[in-house]
Image: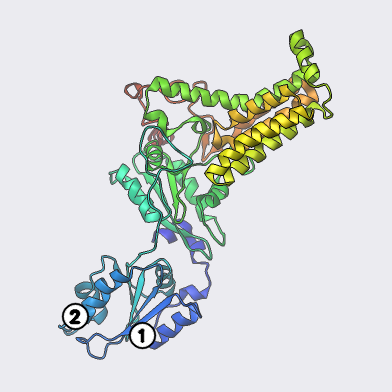
Amino acid sequence: MIIARLLGHNSLKRGDFLKQKITRSLEENISEIKRIFGPDQTLICHRFQPVAIKGLRCCLFSIDGLVSSAQITESILRPISTLAVPPAEGVAPIDFLQQQVLQACEAKKESRLQELLRSLLYGDTVLFLEDSDQALILGTKGFEKRSVSEPASETYLKGPREGFVEPLLHNLAMLRRKLRTPALKLEYFTLGENTKTDCCLCYLDNTVDRMALAQLRKRLAGIAIDGVLDTNYLSELVRDRRYSPFRTTGSSERPDVVAAKLLEGRIAVFVDGSPMALTVPHIFLEQFQSGEDYYVDAAFAGINRSLRIIGFVAATTVLPVYLSLVTFHQAFMPLPLILSIAKARQGVPFPIFMEALLLLLAFDILREAGTRTPSGIGQTLSVVGGLVIGQAAVEARLVSVPVLIIVALSGICSLITPKLKAAVLFCRLLLMLLGVGFGFYGFLLGEVGLAILLCEHRSFGLPYLSSLPLEEVGSSEDSLARAPFWNMQKFGRFLAGVERNRRAGS
């Protein structure tokens, strides 16, 4: 079983309760199921007796709201009730029902109570029979799900419009439509002591990075947690450099993006109940790449990617440089600019660092409020808050106009790369402190420190700065800009795992 192979003994550490098996007594099995669920009114228990099989008593268990009542009626109850021919001599009733009577496309025998409960709680129906130490698990899932739509966090002007939804099987089906090859491997496993969340490991067998795959399996096997409700649970538990603001695991809600990453040798992890897929390894340049870059002309994609890189650099450096120049290095600025800044700061009671910090706090509060409130109100709040509060603060001499402009520029540039939001906040604050404390030399020292930090980062054995032109000759096909498809010599946008596997074996 994939679960036992992937998670080892951890998957069996659930107590003796999960090792129980059902008995041959129908009444004992019914009593045990009812005892486990207690006064749960959603548990449906339906007793019946097939006319054609004399003396056989049966019982169906299902969870109201998770099953399709019409499917139970048409695939299970109607075939059994209309049965006119008894099983042949020597044929067990459970085998007869499974192979010749029931019309459910999913029907399997199971004796372990753990698996029966797990299937029951996921929308399947369990059929118990008298004098049988096995029960039938019948696929009758019918719970409501969100329709497929374009992800709000990854909108494109050109390209596919579909995004992942919450049910695991639907997401895997969308991925299968993109990658119609038997090389696509799916490994199922379960995490969460109480949630028993189904997860799936996906990769292409002919391109996957074997070293990264081995590391990911090992880290997943070491997870012990009460519940898993989203892929971010796994991201925080398996990532490298857990305390770094730069994430070493990627994520996406789009099937086309995940399929492209698998073609490049990466691995995807899906969690049932989450529309977000986790992808590893994850390199720094992925923060500036967008799926839309591959649906437009290469030159236009290069311009857009350059704007994202410039936006990240501006978001982290413009404000620290301004603070260091105004505080320590006025001689580097033109005299008219110095006089203009001094005039604008007349009457402002706060130091320039506190002034910038308060404006950044106000900007982030407005951004968060605009994100959490309904769309119409959020847009109004952002516009009115920015204009009214900013203008009122300037007129009240709480802040100066130059600092307001610099903070606004820094804040807008940070919105260009939403995946680096945490990194921008951390780096900008650190560089501001160094710039105010030690001037431009402190700012440069901070930049060198961040560069060293990025150089030391690795994602599942892969250097975080991979695919940079300076990191490796010939790695610039899809880094700071994108080469046309006819000039790409690699498997897609990344050094595919097959290349690393070949070098590791040589």
Label 2 residue SS: loop
User: x%, y% of residue 51?
Assistant: 21, 87
Q: Is mark 1 on a helix, strand or loop?
A: loop
The furthest residue to the top: 335
Q: How crowded is mark 1: few (under 14 residues within 10 Å), some or many (20 or more)?
A: some
Q: Which mark is residue 24?
A: 1
Return the mark for residue 207: none
| Quadrant housing the N terminus | bottom left
| Spatial separation of the CA atoms under disc 1 and disc 2 | 26 Å
- At 50% across and 55% down in the image, what residue appears? 221
> Would residue 8 be visible to someone looking at this image?
yes
Asked whether residue 241 is in view, the answer is no
Looking at the rendered structure, the kind of residue marked 1 is Arg
Residue in the picture at 36% in, 24% down: 488
Q: Name the residue under label 2.
A: 82
The quadrant of the rendering that contains the C terminus is: top left
Left or right placement of residue 445 versus residue 6 in this view: right
- Could you say which is closer to the camera, residue 125 or residue 25? 125
